[in-house]
Image (cartoon, coloured by chain):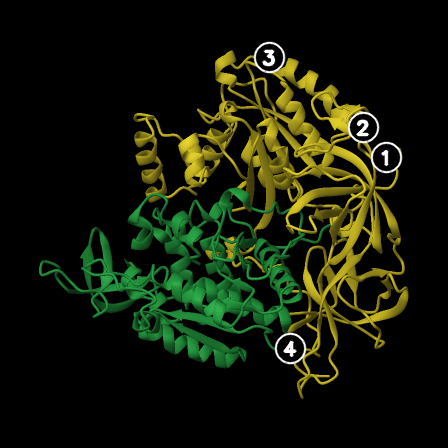
Chain colours: A yellow, B green
């Protein structure tokens, strides 16, 4: 074994703040949030404000947007939507086609915004954007209250199990900052949140255009005692539960240097996808059920005593066991995942070509790839009324359906409610190789937080 | 251990390493596109970490326009040696000599656009099926919509309206014969993240990134190096100024910044207070509003 990685260093993931500006930057956390909405609800204005107020828009970008606004007939009014609508077709047609990713940072946190278009036909984009989000911001126009689209966004947040939902009641300036209007919306939404079993729902009255309660507290809403939107985003817990989950390590790649210095080195590279692993932990490799013990956890040229979700590390085992890509290493002291070829899931269909009941697809689950046959479509979900559709089982693009599949190789899975990584999969067309379906695994629908 | 906290740089690093390993696992013959700029330098170091103690399982490919700063080439050769990587150079001058491309003429001539042909030719020559690039989504509006795994058809072209959805951390690199992928492991990094990472990891950079005195001239508000690669108009006056590069590309499209920053800390402070994006100095983006989208569709980096 080489000497370079023998010396175990302490876990050095938290860089100590040096007290200077530079040190402060190095000690930030990362928060991912999604926003969904249509052209009129002020979503682009809100994002524009967050970017602008955090000084994340640069002068040349602003000038380019000003020029484009003028050319597209907007006069002198700056259309902040042009900042996020990056593609030529989007700018010309004034619509958002695709998920756009935006970045900004405050001294406390770095933020990644998945900005998704909210038209009916773009459920697939909302699902994509929400799949990695810690927080979903749902914008509601104070004048219109909760509309079908708000329900749709909330359903997606529930389906994708986003841990925090922020309901931003926007355009409060147009209802005279009325507490009554805000409370009516809040009360109505709380009923929906209960049905959807949304986890942590927070309401904020804002005016994105004027900035009320976005970055600074507004003096026009003295009745609102809560936090501003930005402060909330800076303080909401980031994935607090993931490191407490049962430990999961899907093996991505086997590292065998074949060099003189590291002649016997055999490491299993991957990203921890639940809980944590320590040197000395007794483990089981699935699906083979081979038992072993962790002798080292390497991260680049360093060795760690313990590693957590979502670190990318390389695990070395005591015994020379047969482990390859697609296997999952789990801790013996934790609950084991289900190992089965029969999988029940909620799918969001992403492709123009409808799902083929009885058809075969390629499945990608964690680092595993296999084939599957669609055994049965149980029902579709009407995302607006949240009712089940039993008489039409054609699963088209943007449809959500409960299906059962049988896989060629057994999957080692948790339910999506338990673990977003080992509980999710995608379906790939065998001929075009396009990603055609997103799947969230359910053990037993009644046990799940989904209410459908 | 609920009080465990991962810094944003650690999380970004972990995500990028995950993607680099996915590429090594999913493709037969990947390559890392190396430009000599800070983003591809960070990529090189991430690749080193991802597979350590094994060697990086793919070569670095540098598309050399023949108009590179000398420092870039020196740095490239040293880095390749340091990381034990393999280097393949695709030459735009060769493409010109072979008649594959025609050199642009006039004062604004640049080989930036010609690179695309050399790049695609090089990928085909070595049968690379995945090209890793250091592009970031915060750089440019067309890039904000690009996937981590970006599919290219048999002509090397990008279809932005028909991209594969990317959910969770599942990446689909399946392709037909003759098609390839561009993969961008540092998509979620910002310019600031890159600089902070360089500081945190203590990564040595080409001297061009730090302040130095250089003969320069100004054109359309952009400061360029007064070197033979850019023909100057008679009215353009050469002056000596204290400058540094904020991004490094080919000499003809690299705008210089007036700066006295001579440490990473200085650079980070400078960027934190800057009101112009790093690509604000890139003349290749200024050709039209959709300049980047058009070049990307054609197969540019």
Chain of the residue under the numbered disc 3 shown in the image: A
Along the polypeptide, which appears first: circle 2 or circle 1? Answer: 1
Residue that mark 1 sits on: A445
Along the polypeptide, which appears first: circle 3 or circle 2? Answer: 3
Residue that mark 3 sits on: A181
Residue that mark 2 sits on: A452
Tell me which residue sits at (31%, 45%) in the image. Answer: B288
Q: Position of residue B297 (x, y in %)?
A: 44, 51
Left or right of A443? Residue A28 is left
Asked if marks 2 and 1 fall on the same chain, the answer is yes
Along the polypeptide, which appears first: circle 3 or circle 1? Answer: 3
In the displayed structure, B195 sits above or below B82; it is: above
Tell me which residue sits at (84%, 74%) in the image. Answer: A321
Chain of the residue under the numbered disc 2 shown in the image: A
Q: Position of residue A419 (x, y in %)?
A: 78, 47
* Residue B54, label in figure: 4
**Badge 2 vs badge 1, beta-carbon distance below 8 Å:** yes
Q: Position of residue B65 (x, y in %)?
A: 34, 69
Question: What whole-number distance in Å separates the C-alpha atoms at marks 4 and 3?
Answer: 62 Å
| Badge 1 element | helix
Label 3 or label 2, whichever lies nearer to me, is 2
Question: What whole-number distance in Å separates the C-alpha atoms at marks 3 and 1?
Answer: 36 Å
């Amino acid at each position: 074994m080489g000497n370079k990685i023998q010396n175990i260093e302490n876990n050095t993931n938290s860089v100590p703040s040096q007290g200077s500006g530079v040190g402060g930057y190095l000690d930030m956390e990362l928060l991912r949030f999604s926003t969904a909405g249509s052209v009129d609800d002020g979503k682009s204005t809100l994002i524009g404000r967050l970017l602008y107020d955090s000084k994340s828009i640069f002068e040349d970008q602003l000038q380019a947007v000003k020029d484009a606004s003028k050319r597209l007939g907007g006069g002198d009014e700056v259309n902040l939507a042009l900042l996020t609508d990056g593609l030529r077709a989007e700018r010309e047609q004034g619509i958002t086609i695709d998920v756009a990713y935006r970045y900004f940072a405050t001294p406390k946190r770095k933020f990644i915004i998945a900005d998704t278009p909210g038209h009916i036909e773009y459920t697939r984009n909302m699902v994509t954007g929400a799949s990695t989000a810690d927080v979903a911001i749902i914008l509601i126009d104070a004048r219109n209250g909760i509309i079908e689209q708000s329900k749709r966004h909330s359903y997606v947040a529930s389906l994708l199990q986003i841990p925090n939902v922020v309901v931003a009641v926007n355009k409060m300036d147009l209802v005279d900052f009325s507490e009554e209007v805000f409370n009516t919306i809040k009360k109505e939404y709380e009923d929906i949140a209960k049905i959807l079993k949304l986890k942590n729902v927070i309401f904020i009255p804002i005016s994105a255009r004027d900035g009320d309660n976005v970055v600074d507290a507004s003096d026009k809403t003295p009745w609102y005692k809560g936090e501003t939107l930005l402060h909330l985003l800076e303080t909401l817990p980031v994935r607090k539960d993931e490191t407490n989950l049962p430990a999961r390590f899907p093996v991505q790649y086997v590292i065998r240097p074949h060099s003189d210095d590291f002649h016997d080195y055999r490491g299993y590279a991957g990203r921890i996808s639940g809980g944590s692993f320590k040197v000395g932990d007794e483990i089981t490799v699935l699906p083979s059920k081979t038992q072993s013990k962790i002798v080292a956890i390497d991260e680049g040229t360093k060795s760690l005593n313990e590693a957590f979700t979502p670190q990318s590390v390389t695990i070395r085992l005591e015994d020379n066991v047969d482990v390859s890509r697609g296997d999952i290493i789990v801790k013996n002291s934790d609950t084991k995942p289900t190992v089965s070829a029969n999988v029940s899931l909620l799918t969001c269909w992403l492709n123009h070509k409808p799902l083929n009941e009885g058809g075969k697809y390629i499945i990608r689950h964690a680092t595993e790839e296999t084939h599957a046959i669609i055994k049965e479509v149980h029902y579709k979900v009407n995302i607006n009324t949240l009712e089940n559709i039993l008489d039409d089982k054609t699963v088209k693009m943007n449809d959500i359906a409960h299906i059962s599949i049988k896989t060629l190789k057994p999957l080692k899975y948790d339910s999506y409610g338990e673990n977003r990584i080992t509980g999710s999969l995608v379906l790939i067309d065998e001929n075009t190789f396009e990603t055609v379906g997103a799947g969230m695994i359910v053990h037993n629908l009644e046990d799940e937080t989904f209410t459908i | 251990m609920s009080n465990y906290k991962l810094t944003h740089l650690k999380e970004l690093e972990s995500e990028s390493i995950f993607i680099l390993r996915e590429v090594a696992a999913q493709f037969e013959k990947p390559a890392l596109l190396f430009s000599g700029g800070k983003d591809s330098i960070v990529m090189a170091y991430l690749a080193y970490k991802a597979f350590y103690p094994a060697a990086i399982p793919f070569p670095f490919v540098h598309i050399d326009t023949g108009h590179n700063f000398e420092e870039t080439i020196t740095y490239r050769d040293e880095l390749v040696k340091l990381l034990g990587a393999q280097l393949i150079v695709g030459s735009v001058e060769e493409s010109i000599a072979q008649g594959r491309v025609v050199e642009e003429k006039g004062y604004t001539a640049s080989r930036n656009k010609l690179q695309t042909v050399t790049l695609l030719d090089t990928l085909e020559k070595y049968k690379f099926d995945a090209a890793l690039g250091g592009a970031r989504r915060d750089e440019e509006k067309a890039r904000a919509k690009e996937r981590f795994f970006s599919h290219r058809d048999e002509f090397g072209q990008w279809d932005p309206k028909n991209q594969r959805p990317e959910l969770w951390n599942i990446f689909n690199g399946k392709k037909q014969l003759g098609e390839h992928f561009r993969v961008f492991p540092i998509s979620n990094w910002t310019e600031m993240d890159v600089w902070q990472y360089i500081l945190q990891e203590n990564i040595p950079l080409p001297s061009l990134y730090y302040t130095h005195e250089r003969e320069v001239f100004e054109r359309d508000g952009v400061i360029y190096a007064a070197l033979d690669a850019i023909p100057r108009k008679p009215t353009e006056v050469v002056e000596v100024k204290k400058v540094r590069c904020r991004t490094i590309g080919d000499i003809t499209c690299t705008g210089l910044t007036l700066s006295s920053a001579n440490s990473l800390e200085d650079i980070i402070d400078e960027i934190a207070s800057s009101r112009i994006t790093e690509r604000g100095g890139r003349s290749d983006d200024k050709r039209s509003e959709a300049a980047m989208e058009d070049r990307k569709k054609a197969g540019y980096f």
